[in-house]
Image: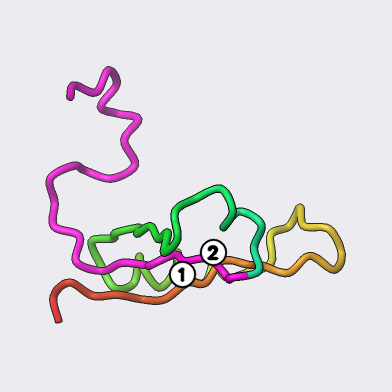
Amino acid sequence: MEISNQHNLREQRGLPRPFGIKVTLNGADPFANLVDEGWETFHWYATNEQRDEAFEDMRSRHRYSRRGDRPSLIYSKVDKSA
């Protein structure tokens, strides 16, 4: 697929990205009723440092969260090179 504006890509396509973050749901999350059982998704990064930075950002409290909101996504680090 062609990209209309290559300069808008944050990452260069086609580069190996062996470091990832696996995202799964807490069983009590109502979103689990909308997706298949065992739903998961992955985010891939070129370096361990990029992955770790994104991991900490994903796990942190969202600045627009309401008081008392608790994250219901579960994040775990994965490595394709291992």
| Residue type beneath disc 2 | Met
Mark 2 and 1 residues: CB-CB less than 8 Å, in contact? Answer: yes
Q: Residue at x 77, y 57 (%)?
A: 65
Residue 34, placed above or below residue 23:
above
Residue that carries the numbered disc 2 in the rendered image: 58
Quadrant in the picture for the C terminus: bottom left
* Predominant SS of the magenta segment: loop
> In terms of depth relative to the viewer, which is nearer, 25 or 71?
25
Name which quarter of the figure residue 41 lies in.
bottom left
Q: Which mark is residue 55?
A: 1
Q: Position of residue 71 (x, y in %)?
A: 66, 67
Q: Residue at x 36, y 76 (%)?
A: 77
Q: Position of residue 52 (x, y in %)?
A: 40, 73
Q: Residue at x 28, y 45 (%)?
A: 11
Residue 81 versus residue 72 in the image, above or below: below
Which of the 4 quarters of the picture holds residue 23? bottom left
Q: Residue 32: x percent and y percent?
A: 57, 58
Q: Is residue 17 magenta?
A: yes
